[in-house]
């Protein structure tokens, strides 16, 4: 086929597909897409809250510490998202965590949850090790 004939063919195919999936007159009832079926791009914060709530209640200290670090990053990256359902878990860990490290990291997480904007520049480097990461957070609290 010549390139000149491909353009009208592509345009016709696009229009036909759009008409069909929008539920035009020729579309069948099964082919219509409703807005509830369209997947919205982005993170599902409902699933994140449930998953990390379970991780915070784990008996494995490394799982809990990893969850705390990830939740801190999530809170700083998405300060407007509603993650308040996790705060009771964080308070419980800050007061009754299995290890001193968990209690300390949960305390830092609570500080981040109270004012995530204050910590944005503390985590600009993605190459921080765990110790450096928490050290930067603590420095921001001390100031």
Image: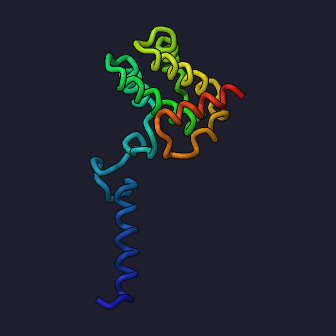
Residue 62 in view: yes
The quarter holding residue 8 reads bottom left
Q: Say left or right for 131 vs 5.
A: right
Q: Position of residue 142 (x, y in %)?
A: 68, 25
- Seen as rendered, the residue at the extreme top is 96
Query: For residue 61, what is the image quadrant?
Result: top left
* Residue that appears at 39% across and 89% down: 4
- From the viewer's side, name the closer residue of 29 and 104: 104
Residue 119 point in image, percent of width and height: 63, 34
- Residue 91 is left or right of residue 35, and the answer is right
In this picture, residue 28 sits left or right of residue 133: left
Can I make out residue 89 in this image? no
Report the side of 110 relative to 47 (left or right).
right
Up the image or down, 64 lies above or below 135; here it is above
Residue in view at x 66 percent, y 26 percent: 141
The colour scheme is rainbow
Residue 140 position, x and y percent, is: 66, 31
* In the depicted structure, whether residue 55 falls above or below residue 74: above
Q: Residue at x 36, y 25 (%)?
A: 62
Quadrant the C terminus occupies: top right
Residue that appears at 40% across and 55% down: 22
Q: Nearer the viewer, residue 92 or 50?
A: 92
User: Quadrant of the image for the N terminus?
Assistant: bottom left
Number of marks in the rendered image: 0
Q: Position of residue 117 (x, y in %)?
A: 66, 35
């Amino acid at each position: 086929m010549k390139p000149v004939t491909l353009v009208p063919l592509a345009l016709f195919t696009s229009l036909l597909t759009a008409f069909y999936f929008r539920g035009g007159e020729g579309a069948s009832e099964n082919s219509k897409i409703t807005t509830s079926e369209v997947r919205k791009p982005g993170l599902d914060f409902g699933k994140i809250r449930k998953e990390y709530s379970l991780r915070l209640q784990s008996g494995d200290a490394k799982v809990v510490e990893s969850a705390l670090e990830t939740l801190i990053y999530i809170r700083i990256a998405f300060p407007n998202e509603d993650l308040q359902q996790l705060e009771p878990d964080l308070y419980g860990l800050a007061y009754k965590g299995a290890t001193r490290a968990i209690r300390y990291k949960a305390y830092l997480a609570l500080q981040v949850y109270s004012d995530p904007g204050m910590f944005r520049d503390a985590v600009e480097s993605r190459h921080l090790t765990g110790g450096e990461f928490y050290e930067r957070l603590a420095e921001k609290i001390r100031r």
